[in-house]
Image (tube, helix red, strand yellow):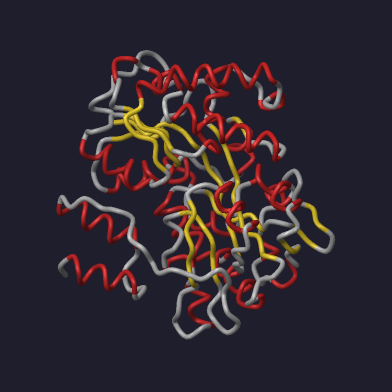
Amino acid sequence: MDVLDQLGAMREGKMSRRAFTRSLMAAGVAVATVPMGSRGARAAEGDQATYFTWGGYDIPEFFAEYREKHGDTNPDFAIFGASEEALTKMRGGFVVDVSHPCNQSVPRWAASGLFQPVDMSRLSHGGDVMPELLALEGNDADGGNWMVPFDWGQTSITYRTDLVEVEGEESWDMLWDERYKNKLGSLGAGADAWWVGAIKAGVDFDNLDSPEAFEKIAAVMREQRPLIRMYTDDTTTLEQALASGELVAAMTWNSSAVALQGEGVPVRFAQPKEGALTWVCGLMIHKDAPNVDKAYDLIDSMLSVETGKFLVGDYGYGHSNAKTFDEFDAETLTGLGLSKNPTEILSAGHFQKPQSQEWESKMNAMFEQIKAGF
């Protein structure tokens, strides 16, 4: 297929965005974010469920059970680059069915009054969700849980093993290394980068909201700024830059290393001596969701073992369904930086903790200023 044929296949759900990207990368074609269609301010009754999510989750492989129930049709997708951006848009009146925050955002999202508790008894796979993931701080709600855990993993450094000289143990210092000035990249959201700055600055996450901690983190982020070639919320852009050698190392999630290794690019997903940033993300239902039944179908599809096998094998993320891990041997999971016991991973690094809306707004404003060079 030529590029136009592939683009058509992706939009029709016959080809995943990831497969499309890989095809173009193999052909040496630069990839921009491809729109999957736009939505109005509110999804209409009778439409498919609308899923508001990060880029890369808008692909058919996550929705096999949903498609079986709804005429081989995908949900509708709306994409955000950062969770604060998503919440701000919904506060402004954008109504969806299901959205995809991460654990540190759940209490703030719940406090917004924009979401309804999820009744786990309505999910056929609900009983298979790992209890330790459901028991996240701030996730209890009357009659259910605010968020249904879906994926979990790490934020670390993906680096070119042929272009980076590691001195001693892997460390977050790699992203502050003057030798690689203008060849380093970073995720563009403070929800990752600022927390990594806290690890670099030696700030305990229990004390993240103190004025002293804020200044320490801001100082190390300013120190890093002249070294960074690109900040972006588009992981495909980071992956392409690493593949071409434009970048030699970048802050990424597990999936970037897995994708690049699958393309034969010599990269490694670092295990920094200071500890990686660890997280759990999941699914919340809007209080005014126009398609509540389909919202539950969407969530149930994402909890299935079939979806989990794809998530673990293709993205390198952990899945919330415990049965998924029966499909993989321990060696494979270790190679992906995972374990059949998520507690091993989540406790080994620095687990993100909920913060106040005031802190979140202040942090994002400061990080944007630092990225702009101030």
In the depicted structure, whether residue 374 falls above or below residue 153: above
Number of numbered discs on residues = 0
Q: Which corner quadrant of the image does residue 326 belong to? A: bottom right
Instruction: Classify 2 as above or below 280.
Output: below
**Where, by quadrant of the figure, is residue 97 drawn?**
bottom right
Which residue shows up at 15% across the image and 54% down it?
A: 27
Q: Residue at x 39, y 36 (%)?
A: 231
Image x and y of residue 330, in percent:
49, 45
Of 37 and 308, which appears nearest the observer?
Answer: 37
- Percent x, y of residue 292: 66, 75
* Residue nearest the observer in this picture, 19 or 176: 176
Residue 182: percent from the left, percent from the top? Answer: 29, 25
For the N terminus, the quadrant is bottom left
The furthest residue to the right: 142
Residue plotted at (40% across, 19% down): 176
- Seen in the picture, residue 253 relative to 312 is either above or below; the reply is above
Judge whether 69 appears above or below 108 on screen.
Answer: below
Q: Is residue 236 toward the left or the right of residue 329 in the image? A: left
Question: Which x, y percent locates residue 16?
Answer: 34, 65
Q: Quadrant of residue 253?
A: top left
